[in-house]
Amino acid sequence: MFCRNQTARATVARGSALEMEIRRGKFRKSVFQDTSQDSDIQKKIDHEIRMRDGACKLLAACSQRDQALEAAKSLQTCSTRIMAYMSELQRMKEAQVMQKATRRSSDAGPLDDRLPCKGKVAISDLRIPLMWKDTEYFKNKGELHRCAVFCLLQLGGEIFDTDMVIVDRTLTDICFDNTIVFGEAGPGFELRVELYSCCSEDDYSAGSTPRKLASKLSSSLGRSAGKKLRAAMEPGPCSPVSNGGAAPLLLPVPSVPGPKYHLLAHTTLSLSHVQDSFRTHDLTISGNEECSYWLPLYGSMCCRLAAQPQCMTQQMMSGCLKVKQCGGDPQSWTKVYAVLKGSSLFCYHQQEDLEANIEPAFTIAVNKETRIRASEKDPQSKVQNICISNQYGGEEVTHTLTTDSREDTHRWMEAFWQHFYDMSQWKQCCDDLMKIELPSPRKPAPVMPKQGSLYHEMGKVFCCRITLCLLRFVLCSHPITTTGEVTGLGFHVNYYIIFSCI
């Protein structure tokens, strides 16, 4: 029987996508041959590899621009997640090796195993200002440059992406309305924000449009006539479309099979950037004006970065206590049900009041300015009391707590020390509870606006040329009666029907 703390085994499923990547030499199998604690990350890697393969197939099959941009975005996200999961797995391996080395070291002294609590980190209302030239924005001159952009946000092994936004010179800011929440962040977190951009001016459906139109028209003409028409309009692999001996119909041939996103800017946010309001942060810009995906960034971004440590949102300790305020009757102990949460010790008359959401009888502040100490043992009960001192209006107020046993006193003291340690690590996040809104639902893929550039006007001219080509083909191949009927085809060809295909 396998024991987690004794032997090692490989947990790579046979026939899985991860095993295929190992066979191709993408990853080393030794990375995956330790304890089964890493199986969750391996499952995530296997899932993202399958998602990446699916995104590649979808990108190859896309004929619409918005579909191709979304598929390329999914491909970039999956690739980033795979690399992040691999790095996370490597860090876990290194931590396991260091832990084993520490255990085997004979001269290793006692280690402080106290760790700070985890917490939630949320980023919302992301704004990236643009700096267009006066001639571009105010006078609306120059080439209409349009890019598709989105953000990848990574904190540890968690990676999220924003919605895709189409940016041109009519926008002064790139706005992402997503609220992204990371649930397992430590106080030493590093949140990396990456802005990716892709030139969206190429129409990825242009290559398939003449074939679709030719197929519709040829099916109406019949098998033999349609075959001749398709042969006359079928382009070579990398050549202009032939027009049956007439002038060639020039079509843009994409140099790559699909769009590709490039890193345009990035920054890293940490605990010092957390604030319960909007702040501006510097961006490191990649690329230059010569790049097709370039956008004139101002060099900064605005966002709201909030954090909620678990010590501010969860019950860190609870139980029955006896409380006495200093200066009162020495025998006036009040029995309460106490809950340590956030910056307060909430004292209820009974536990049922907490469950019924009744307001506490009174509250004792427990913050960074609070002093807690264990008093001398009571000679009668032989139990140490816990003294909590706070400053109220320049006057010190002390509350004394006592428990039913020495073990309970020790647990409460340990909970207080851990609570103070958590607050010292999370710093300003423990002053007041910051508000974090729920993540907004993902919007459907955006519908691309109608293009008004010269390139798209040329597409209309191309459709007219196809119509003229069809008319010339029909008129030259079959006699026409005075009623407009084309003989030999078995139907009437009316000009308005042909133009309705455009």
Image (tube, helix red, strand yellow):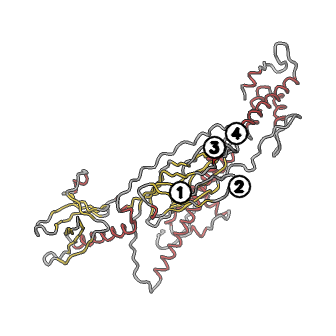
Q: Nearer the viewer, residue 146 or 480?
A: 146
Whole-number angstrom distance, CA of label 4 to CA of label 1: 34 Å
Whole-number angstrom distance, CA of label 1 to CA of label 3: 22 Å
Residue located farthest toward the bottom when viewing the structure as drawn: 107
Q: Which residue is mark 4?
A: 453
Among the 4 quarters of the image, the one containing residue 267: bottom right
Q: Which residue is mark 2?
A: 290
- Are there few (<14), some (14-19), or many (20+) residues within 10 Å of tag 1? many
Image quarter of the C terminus: top right
Specify whether 49 is left or right of 179. Answer: right
Among the 4 quarters of the image, the one containing residue 401: bottom left
The mark nearer the N terminus, 3 or 2, is 3
* Kind of residue indicated by mark 1: Leu
Q: Nearer the viewer, residue 216 or 194?
A: 194
Residue 29 percent across, percent down from the top left? 61, 67
Residue 316 makes an appearance in the image: yes
Q: Nearer the viewer, mark 2 or mark 1?
A: 2
Q: Nearer the viewer, mark 4 or mark 1?
A: 4
Residue 77 makes an appearance in the image: no
Q: Which residue is mark 1?
A: 153
Specify whether 134 is left or right of 342. Answer: right
The mark nearer the N terminus, 4 or 1, is 1
Whole-number angstrom distance, CA of label 3 to CA of label 2: 26 Å
Q: Which residue is mark 3?
A: 67
Whole-number angstrom distance, CA of label 2 to CA of label 1: 26 Å
- Are there few (<14), some (14-19), or many (20+) residues within 10 Å of tag 3? some
Secondary structure under tag 2 reads loop
